[in-house]
Image (cartoon, rainbow, N blue to C red):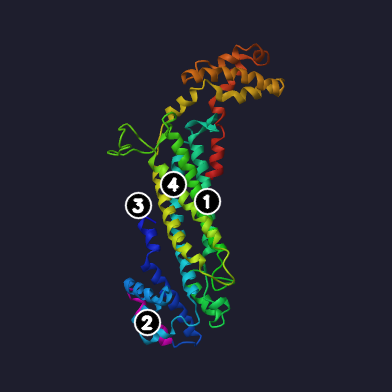
Amino acid sequence: MIPRYARSEMVAVWSPETKFRIWFEIEAHACDALAELGVIPKEAAKTIWEKGGNATFDIERIDAIERETKHDVIAFLTHLAEIVGPDARFVHQGMTSSDVLDTCLNVQLTKASDILLADLDALLASLKKRAFEHKDTITIGRSHGIHAEPTTFGVKLAQAYVEFERCRARLVAAREEIATCAISGAVGTFANIDPRVEEHVADAMGLKAEPVSTQVIPRDRHAMYFATLAVIASSVERLATEIRHLQRTEVLEAEEFFSKGQKGSSAMPHKRNPVLTENLTGLARMVRSYAIPAMENVALWHERDISHSSVERYVGPDATITLDFALARLTNVVENLLVYPERMQGNMDRLGGLVHSQRILLALTQAGVSREDSYRLVQRNAMKVWESYHVSGDATVDFLEQLLADDEVRAALSEEEIRSRFDLGYHTKHADTIFKRVFG
């Protein structure tokens, strides 16, 4: 994580202050349960809350202790004992470090999920607004980067909307899967701590008890979580890449907002570059890169090793902080996107009507011409238009005129039948149906 791509709310989830506060709450809630079970005095549990609950943990002091002990949880417990006093001997009864570390990590990931879900809600709202704004804005659809058939810019944005709706549903599921708690002691047998303590801590922390923890919470949960973030990042990149293509000089159908005083190039003052969406492409690559080590963390030795630990110190903060930033940036791009309907129409017209070729193909087949012959007739007229386009960058040969002058085509279709197939509205007549499916 670097500050350039970080927002304060998500950064706070991963701060040392937040981590140690969660560690304390896990220990203190466990003490409450132990007190209710008669394992430790109730007054001790009360004292732990009173003294530790209002304490400001000294991070430098904890770090200093860790440099000596070479153990982060012991360093924290030692510092907590300095705050609580003699009753601190009842803290961490029957627990192991993973009980604290794994439960804390899952609390942080659920908090991060809530921020990311809010980010997705903001993005969805923006996409919906812009989709309705451009529901009837006709543009060319492209396959292989080449003009295909007309669609609307609103339909493009509606597609992005449902994709991010799926992303949201996946994140809700990933949040539920990751929200587990383990307070089961060494190798997860509960030999030295009652399972009811785990249930109490889980309930107090907004989690569910892990059905079987082997001293650590199984990392398939975390693998799925980070894989979900990677998929969301890929959807971010998909939309960002579309905008980047639309901003190319030769296309220029949409463009990132260019603010007053903004500079596009240190060398070329005329430049207006898609820097935000290019940045989003790079950030998506980073979020995806964290999915592989998270998957490799699944295979730990026997009941537990710590090969996963160093990985998660990176990927937990970095993946969530980066995706949070990316989603907020994408929302800003969508909200302020400059859209040029006239340019969309102009680009479509440059190809001399070729976008209607399929309608002529179908009309010929319906008139009794074989599909093979229909394709041959349409293609030979279309290629004349293409060749003229290659020369000047605008088609100087008109597809409709070519068809009307083709004796074989006219033998099957009247002039009225040919002209009627050049109606743009035909291609967009189901935009309302698509919108009803997407938005209800």
Which is nearer the eye, 155 or 30?
30
Q: CA distance from mark 1 to mark 3?
A: 23 Å
Does the CB distance between marks 2 and 4 fall below 8 Å? no
Q: Position of residue 364 (x, y in %)?
A: 67, 21
User: Element type at marker 3?
Assistant: helix
Q: Earlier in the sequence, mark 1 or mark 3?
A: 3
Residue 102 placement (x, y as % from top left): 49, 69
Q: Which image quarter: residue 279?
A: top left
Q: CA distance from mark 2 to mark 1?
A: 44 Å
Task: Pinpoint residue 291: horizontal percent, then vertical percent.
Answer: 52, 55
Tag shown at residue 231: 1
Query: SS at mark 2?
Result: helix
Tell me how many marks there are: 4
Question: Disc 3 marks which amino acid?
Answer: Arg
Q: Amino acid at mark 1?
A: Val
Q: Secondary structure at mark 1?
A: helix
Give the secondary structure at mark 4.
helix
Q: Which residue is mark 2?
A: 81
